[in-house]
């Protein structure tokens, strides 16, 4: 047993023993331990070196259809006893809820795989400082128009997670996430533009080099200089892969149980109905070894599984945990922790080929604001990017708003590219929407 396991598992087992003796119907325990550090550099200076370490345990108790939770960061036996008693006391004053409770026992991950999610990085603070400073320096050396760096960040994090409940389930796993990023400012003729590049992975050796990260951020910022406004119009729009993710995330939110049972989704009662063109398939694969979005079981102990959310354009599953599934009269899909390694079908076209196919329109590389209404599907966000003519970027564009309705946008997807960022939980290429409203001058 490694130190992290010892530090969490022993208190969990102590609390398990105490809870089993208590006068309650059921209970569940969630424990987390986090350890890591972050280094930030800017303009040849180290701005911040921050170590963080935290642990917490939460117990949820169920009694006569009433539910209450209590949490503690003190994992001593005395503190655990007090935390359990607090939860039991609060449950006496809670309103009964017949839909609350543990996940069904036959769905629990009593036999789960080691998905190899933890890959420690033996990185010392001085080594992280050197990487951050290198990233900072290369960015400014890449192009003389890079006037400043906002921050170069190197981070490494390790997490240990334990879940247990009164159905004799006890599961635990470790994860790691490492990252490097930089934000830069380009300046020309008194105008400034900002952009960034970030890279995250469970394995440190899969991160891009500080040179590539810095150069990519610098090129992105420089290409935005001398941006123009365009007139209001209707035209095709390409969402570059890093912003196309947000469209898929809106879809997932709209088919999530909480939105559905509250009747707050524009995709209410969409199961079995066509939402996308027939070439679109959306599916999760939670058991990819070392996958950025992989998990062996969800936060209710339910075994995660391969799942298709969209098949040939039709919605085939909702995203459900136990509570929302009971409210909807369905069965949990094991998604109490969200979705895992979400894939979107794509063509064999890269971004350049998508632009050539579109011929004339807008390429969006940045979205601003939160103008998305998941009840109606109405979509209106600030944007920046590039105007495309004859399939080629002509000039950068800013200070515009793109608008439409998500239902129409999903139905009017023309193509999805193969330029997928694989180190992400949402794996999609750039996406072409047949027409949207562009509000400009």
Image: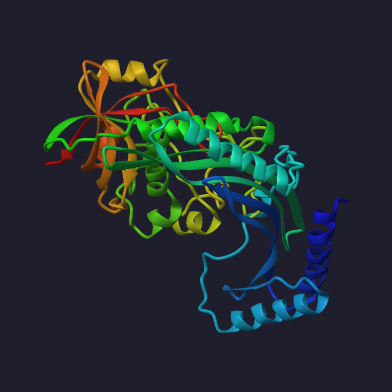
- Whether 149 is drawn above or below 101: the answer is above
Q: In the rendered image, is residue 403 in sight? A: no
Farthest residue to the right: give it.
1
The quarter of the displayed image where residue 223 is located: top left
- Whether 4 is drawn above or below 440: the answer is below
Viewer-proximal residue among 433 and 331: 433
Residue 6 in the figure: left or right of residue 240: right
Residue 278 in the figure: left or right of residue 137: left
Q: Residue at x 66, y 81 (%)?
A: 86
The quarter of the displayed image where residue 20 is located: bottom right
Q: Residue at x 28, y 52 (%)?
A: 371
Residue 131 in the figure: left or right of residue 352: right
Residue 220 in the figure: left or right of residue 323: left
Residue 274 image offset from top left, x and y in percent: 32, 33
Residue 80 image offset from top left, x and y in percent: 76, 75
Indicate the colouring scheme: rainbow
Residue 214 image offset from top left, x and y in percent: 51, 34
* Number of marks present in the image shown: 0
Q: Which quadrant is the C terminus positioned in?
A: top left
- Whether 224 is drawn above or below 367: the answer is above
Residue 133 image offset from top left, x and y in percent: 60, 42
- Whether 184 is drawn above or below 256: the answer is above
Q: Residue at x 78, y 61 (%)?
A: 8
Q: In the rendered image, is residue 60 in sight? A: yes
Q: Residue at x 43, y 30 (%)?
A: 143
């Amino acid at each position: 047993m490694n130190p992290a396991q010892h530090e969490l598992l022993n208190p969990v087992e102590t609390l398990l023993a105490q809870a089993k003796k208590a006068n309650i119907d059921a209970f569940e325990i969630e424990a987390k331990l986090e350890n890591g550090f972050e280094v930030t550099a800017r303009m040849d200076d180290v701005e911040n070196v921050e170590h963080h370490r935290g642990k917490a345990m939460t117990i949820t108790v169920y009694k006569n259809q009433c539910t209450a939770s209590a949490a503690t960061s003190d994992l001593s036996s005395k503190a655990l006893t007090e935390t359990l008693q607090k939860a039991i006391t609060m449950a006496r004053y809670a309103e009964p809820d017949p839909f609350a409770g543990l996940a069904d026992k036959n769905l629990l991950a009593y036999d789960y795989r080691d998905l190899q999610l933890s890959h420690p990085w033996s990185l010392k603070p001085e080594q992280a400082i050197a990487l951050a400073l290198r990233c900072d320096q290369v960015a400014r050396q890449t192009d003389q128009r890079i006037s400043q760096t906002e921050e170069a960040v190197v981070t490494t994090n390790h997490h240990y997670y334990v879940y247990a409940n009164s159905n004799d389930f006890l599961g635990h796993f470790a994860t790691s996430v490492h990252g490097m990023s930089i934000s830069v400012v380009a300046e020309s003729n008194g105008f400034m533009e900002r952009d960034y590049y970030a890279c995250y992975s469970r394995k440190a050796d899969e991160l891009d080099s500080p040179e590539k990260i810095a150069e990519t951020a610098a090129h992105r910022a420089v290409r935005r200089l001398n941006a123009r406004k365009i007139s209001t119009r209707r035209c095709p729009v390409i969402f570059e892969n890093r912003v196309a993710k947000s469209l898929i995330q809106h879809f997932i939110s709209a088919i999530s149980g909480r939105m559905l049972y509250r009747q707050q989704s524009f995709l209410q009662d969409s199961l079995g109905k066509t939402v996308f063109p027939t070439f679109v398939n959306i599916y999760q694969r939670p058991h990819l070894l070392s996958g950025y979005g992989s998990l062996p079981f969800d936060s209710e102990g339910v075994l995660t599984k391969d799942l298709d959310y969209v098949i040939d354009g039709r919605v085939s599953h909702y995203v459900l945990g136990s509570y929302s599934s009971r409210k909807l009269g369905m069965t949990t899909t094991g998604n109490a922790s969200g979705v895992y390694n979400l894939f979107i079908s794509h063509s064999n076209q890269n971004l350049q080929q998508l632009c050539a196919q579109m011929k004339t329109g807008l390429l969006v590389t940045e979205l601003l604001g939160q103008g998305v209404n998941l009840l109606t599907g109405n979509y209106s966000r600030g944007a920046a990017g590039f105007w495309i003519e004859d399939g080629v970027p002509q000039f950068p564009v800013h200070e515009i708003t793109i608008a439409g309705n998500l239902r129409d946008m999903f139905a009017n997807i023309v193509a999805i590219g193969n330029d997928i960022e694989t180190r992400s939980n949402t794996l999609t290429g750039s996406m072409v929407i047949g027409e949207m409203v562009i509000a400009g001058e």
